[in-house]
Amino acid sequence: MQDQLQELVQAAYANRELINEELYSDAVKQTIANIDKGIFRVAEPVSDGNWKVNQWVKEAILLYFGIQKMQTWEVGPFEFYDKMLLKKDYESLGVRAVPHAVARYGAYIARNVVLMPSYVNIGAYVGEGTMVDTWATVGSCAQIGKHVHLSGGVGIGGVLEPLQAAPVIIEDGCFLGSRCIVVEGVIVEKEAVLGANVVLTQSTKIIDVSGDEPIEYKGRVPARSVVIPGSYAKKFPAGEYHVNCALIIGQRKESTNLKTSLNDALRDFNLSV
């Protein structure tokens, strides 16, 4: 089934005229239905601990935008005009959705997820037991693991185009403090803790300052790291200025419960954020 759908989707993406034929448009719709159920994913973990991006699934999402018709919804005094349906039947899915939580059809929301007033875009994957807190945003195709806490105002970037761009990945057990921003395909590995206002892009220096010498990373936060915002001096033609970075100040202790609060995790390092 997957191989057949993949072949049809890739053919339609290469030749957009084909999408006018029912065989190809149905293949796109079936693919989106499988993303919505968590059967297909834009990215998935592989055995060596890395992630594999399924480009053809992203292609299906882009094609789906093309075949969907605009329509109007009215909810009380509110009106919406869009192409995408919203997820529903949260009770049967085992998901708690607090008004005004919004998740688009084509996003997978696992059982025991709590959606506070927040937004989850098409192609995203949110694992079991995760909390998407108030005004947090999970962008298109972002992959959020199990038992993750996205605190208030967290912004997880989305990615559909360019097609080769990788999605943001937040692995199991991570805790992201208020107003964190993670974009451009950054991977936050298992059980990491990001303090409030940490901003991570592909160009952000992630510097481990917990040892005798700094160790620099980009695009990936190592597992169980405790991270806070920082800055470093950089020279420009107009002078020397401080540029944002992220500082790894230590490792989450084995004794720390996975459901610990951000403050408890940072208290281990005599810091408060």
Image: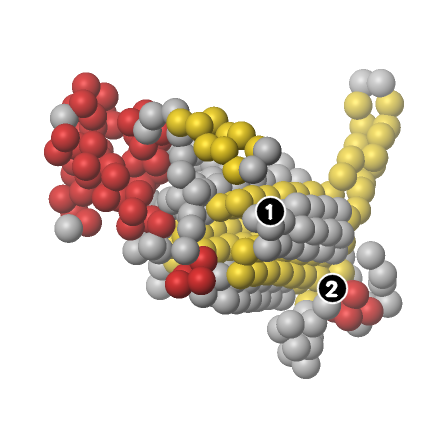
Mark 1 residue crowding within 10 angstroms, few (<14) / some (14–19) / many (20+): few
**Would you say 266 lies left or right of 256 here?**
right
Q: Say if 222 sits above or below 26 in the image.
A: below
Please report the residue visible at 48 percent of the width from the left and 41 percent of the height from the top: 121
Which amino acid is tagged 1?
His
Residue 160, percent from left and from top:
43, 33
Picture quarter with the C terminus: bottom right
Tell me the residue that label 2 is attached to: 262
Residue bearing mark 1: 100
Q: What residue is at 56 percent from the left and 37 percent from the top?
A: 76
Indicate the position of residue 244 as horizontal and vertical percent values. Answer: 76, 39
Q: Is residue 109 left or right of residue 196?
A: left
Q: Nearer the viewer, mark 2 or mark 1?
A: 1
Of 188 and 12, nearer the camera is 12
- In the rendered structure, the answer to whether residue 41 lies left or right of residue 22 reads right
Whether residue 179 appears in this view of the structure is yes
Neighbours of disc 2 within 10 Å: few (<14), some (14-19), many (20+): many
Number of on-image labels: 2
Give the left or right position of residue 129, taking residue 134 as reference. Answer: left
Question: Front-most of 266 and 207?
Answer: 266
The disc labelled 2 sits on which kind of residue?
Answer: Leu
| Vertical side of 195 occupied by 16: above or below | above
Residue 256 lies in quadrant: bottom right
- Image quadrant assignment for residue 190: bottom right
Q: x, y (%) of residue 134?
A: 67, 51
